[in-house]
Image (cartoon, rainbow, N blue to C red):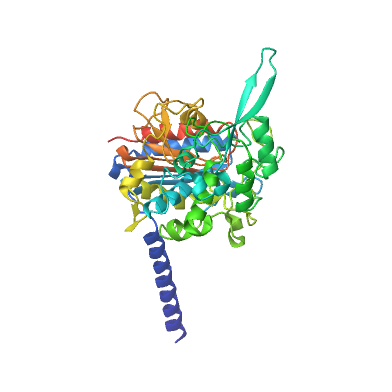
């Protein structure tokens, strides 16, 4: 009798494990061998070896890279440590601070509301946030003696929703601007601290953020200049006003749950803290301490520009949804026409870009900007392999992703490696992934 009970118990356990495994597989992407989708296993292992070499040399703590082609996951590897201080190895379920890779998520949220008819791209944002009704622009003048003065002139046109999505709003980052008037206004607004953690805009409430930033002058006339900025943080506030929901709730309801992005949000729950990836204590390139967002505490606002957390697997599902034209596993998030609009050139010849998107992200020219993504303009110019129409973005702590529609390719890299080495790692990943494509 005991033997039969033991066999029955083991059988039930085995069936339970199989059911759990089947459920996990059902929630993930289909897999394939690289050769089945025209890629080389050997070349992809060279990618892993290159990353491992960087870990072995102490240049960064570790990384996860996932590659999907034709909607099938063909490469999924983790190298290095989750936290070098403890020696804990990096595992594929690690949770990362994704910083500016939050921007594409918030941008998709806004475009959902465009599809719902609640937002138009040409709308002035003052329609949703009246605080931005009358804006001024900070003008810099230098006299013959070299003395610099700052004055404020009225904005020639309103900031539009499209301006927020493509970073032509005249808003800036306190961390990046050289204009002391704007920098001080951002300090007063509580969204920038000189000695604080960079890009931490979560210490004020959503209402305080809007009120504070609206008091600051703009750096350029709206619609005139591409300047990487807090635009998407304010876009998140537009989403909240138009939807009637907090950004975190809207994204969870409309994007994360439908795509089964189970570990994506704006805070890491207590139960998952053991999976939080950490940077090296000291950046090897600068010799300075690495300071990242404290994503274990409840934020004052859901920062659509830099406050998100996610896993490589979650973000890959988001990327493949885009690569498939807005649909995954039978759940349509966006129309293919909307994805096409978001990944088109929205700067054209009339918008100035003193520092182009490609130069900012990877140190190469050849890229313009769409609605939430950097977009490649042609097969040449950029000093990295890729295809015309590919689109991408990255995060300040070392995360990076891109989608190449012509190659049916989606790639996600997750690392917690802030610092000046990031553009080089982005270029390295791109060239090694494209080298593995054989047909």
The front one of 356 and 292 is 356
Residue 421: x %, y % from top left = 56, 31
Q: Is residue 323 left or right of residue 144?
A: left
Which image quarter is the C terminus in? top left
250 vs 388, left or right, is right
Locate residue 223 relative to residue 299 in the image: left or right.
left
> On the picture, is 272 further left or further right than 144?
left
Residue 305 makes an appearance in the image = no
Residue 73 picture location, percent across and down: 37, 48
Q: Say whether residue 308 is visible.
A: yes
Q: Quadrant of residue 290?
A: top right
- Residue shown at the point (65%, 18%) measured from the top left: 142
Viewport quadrant of the N terminus:
bottom left
The residue furthest right is: 195
Q: How many marks?
A: 0
Q: Residue furthest bottom?
A: 1
Q: Out of 381 and 52, give the one closest to the viewer.
A: 381
Q: Name above or below for residue 205 compared with residue 363.
A: below
* Percent position of residue 379, x then y: 34, 27
Q: Is residue 43 above or below residue 73?
A: above
439 lies above or below 146:
below
Residue 148: x and y in percent read 68, 21
């Amino acid at each position: 009798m005991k033997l039969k009970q033991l066999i029955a118990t083991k059988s039930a356990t085995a069936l339970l494990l199989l059911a759990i495994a089947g459920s996990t597989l059902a929630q993930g992407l289909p897999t394939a061998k690289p050769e089945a989708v025209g890629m080389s296993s050997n070349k992809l292992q060279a990618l892993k070896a290159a990353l491992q070499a960087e870990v072995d040399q102490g240049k960064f703590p570790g990384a996860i890279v996932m590659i999907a082609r034709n909607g099938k996951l063909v490469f999924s590897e983790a190298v290095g440590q989750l936290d070098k201080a403890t020696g804990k190895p990096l595992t594929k379920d690690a949770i990362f601070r994704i910083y500016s890779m939050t921007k594409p998520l918030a941008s998709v949220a806004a475009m959902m509301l465009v599809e719902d008819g609640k937002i138009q791209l040409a709308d002035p944002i003052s329609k949703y946030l009246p605080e931005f009704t009358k804006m001024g622009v900070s003008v810099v003048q230098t006299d013959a003696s070299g003395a610099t003065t700052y004055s404020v002139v009225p904005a020639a046109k309103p900031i539009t929703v499209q301006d927020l999505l493509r970073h032509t709003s005249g808003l800036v980052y306190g961390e990046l601007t050289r204009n002391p008037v704007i920098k001080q206004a951002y300090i007063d607004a509580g969204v920038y601290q000189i000695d604080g953690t960079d890009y931490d805009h979560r210490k004020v409430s959503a209402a305080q953020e809007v009120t504070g930033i609206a008091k600051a002058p703009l750096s350029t006339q709206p619609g005139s200049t591409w300047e990487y900025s807090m635009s998407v943080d304010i876009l998140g506030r537009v989403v909240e006003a138009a939807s009637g929901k907090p950004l975190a709730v809207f994204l969870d309801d409309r994007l994360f749950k439908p795509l089964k992005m189970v570990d994506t949000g704006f805070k890491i729950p207590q139960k998952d803290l053991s999976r939080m990836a950490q940077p090296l204590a000291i950046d090897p390139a600068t010799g300075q301490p690495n300071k990242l967002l404290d994503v274990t505490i409840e934020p004052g606002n859901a920062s659509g520009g830099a406050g998100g957390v996610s896993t490589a697997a979650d973000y890959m599902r988001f990327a493949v949804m885009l690569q498939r034209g807005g649909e995954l596993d039978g759940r349509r998030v966006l129309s293919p026409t909307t994805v096409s609009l978001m990944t088109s050139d929205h700067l054209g010849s009339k918008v100035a870009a003193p520092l182009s998107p490609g130069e900012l992200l990877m140190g190469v020219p050849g890229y313009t900007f769409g609605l939430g993504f950097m977009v490649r303009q042609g097969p040449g110019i950029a000093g990295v392999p890729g295809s015309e129409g590919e689109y991408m973005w990255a995060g300040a702590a070392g995360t990076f992703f891109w989608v190449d529609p012509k190659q049916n390719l989606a790639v996600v890299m997750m690392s917690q490696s802030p610092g000046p080495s990031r553009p080089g790692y982005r270029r390295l990943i791109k060239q090694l992934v494209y080298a593995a494509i054989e047909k």
